[in-house]
Image: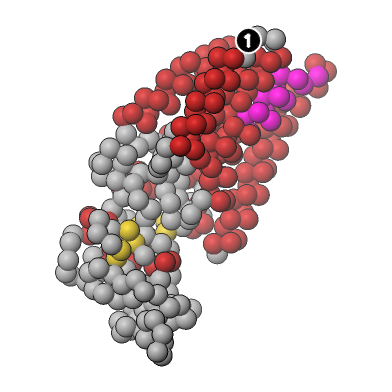
Amino acid sequence: MDQAPGSPQGPLERGPAGRGPAGDGPLGDGHGGAGLPTCYRHPDRETGIRCTRCERPICPECMVDASVGFHCPQCARGGSGSGPAPAASRPRTVTGGSVDRFTHRFELLGQAYDPLLGSVEGVAQGQWYRLLTAMFLHGGFLHIAFNMLSLWWIGGPLEAALGRARYLALYLASGLAGSALSYLIAAPNQPSVGASGAIFGLFGAMAVLMRRLRYDMRPVVALLVINLVITFGWGGIAWQAHVGGLVAGLIVGYAMVHAPRERRALVQYGTCALVLVAVVVMTLIRTAQLG
């Protein structure tokens, strides 16, 4: 399961044009006439929400999830000097443990101000490596245990059928496709970790292979259905990564199994290359949206 390690991180800390980092401008309530107060960082946005530490009005983009209510970006990074410690708003793993700096630096994150690192982080900031490194991080013991159990069940037989190089190409293409789809459509301030995008790709390829060999598909279909039910029925799971990995696995798996003998390597690795092109296109589109 690709999981978000706790509540979403603070939103992107960008102030209005020409004012520099958020929180450096005036600290007034920002009332806009007789209506609701306006966000202290976005004077054109009315809001009824205030920071629970400093009581500044904040719009949804500026809300940083806290243990009680919401904080403004400045209080989330500890700039107000009052109220609970900044660690109170730090993300937590699925088991409640704190997420360390290493995880923060390599998890999948679109674009957000990270209070722990003290800077705006994410793929949109040029950190494309997060699409790959997030595949090797997990949010707790149960998280990695489920993924490794699934990998043990289907990884060995599939590697034996495809060969090591093709199996690795399938795994990486599926994992990157899952990360790219998650980056494209998930909230930019929602971090996620896990190898499930790649593992769902293996599920898809295994289904294609078993159908081609005319094996009984009921076990793999049942396992896939159970995982999809968990994906959409259990909170805190990055379903985008699962769907992206599954689709890529079906496409690459079909090419691996059904490629004509005379052009087998060209079709197989060419399909992997096309999936990687799709990954790059999705990443560029989302980066342009967040730029």
Q: Please name the residue that numbered disc 1 is placed on.
A: 216
Above-or-below relation of 228 to 56: above
Q: Position of residue 131 (x, y in %)?
A: 51, 43
Our reading of the magenta stretch's main secondary structure is helix
Total residue callouts: 1
Q: Residue at x 35, y 44 (%)?
A: 5
Q: Position of residue 271 (x, y in %)?
A: 71, 32
Q: Which residues are magenta?
A: 248-260
Q: Nearer the viewer, residue 232 or 92?
A: 232
Query: Is residue 68 visible in this depiction of the protein?
Result: yes
Q: Residue at x 62, y 29 (%)?
A: 249
For the N terminus, the image quarter is top left
Q: Residue at x 63, y 55 (%)?
A: 285
Above-or-below relation of 280 to 194: below
Colour convention of the picture: secondary structure
Q: Residue at x 71, y 14 (%)?
A: 212
Q: Would residue 85 appear left or right of 202 to someone viewing this image?
A: left
Judge whether residue 192 is colored magenta: no
Above-or-below relation of 190 to 29: above
Q: Position of residue 267 (x, y in %)?
A: 76, 27
Q: Nearer the viewer, residue 234 or 251?
A: 234
Quadrant in which residue 52 is drawn? bottom left
Q: Secondary structure at mark 1?
A: loop
Q: Nearer the viewer, residue 284 or 54?
A: 54
Judge whether residue 252 is colored magenta: yes
Q: Position of residue 33 (x, y in %)?
A: 41, 90
* Direction bottom: furthest residue: 33
* Other residues around mark 1 within 10 Å, as few (<14) / some (14–19) / many (≥20): few
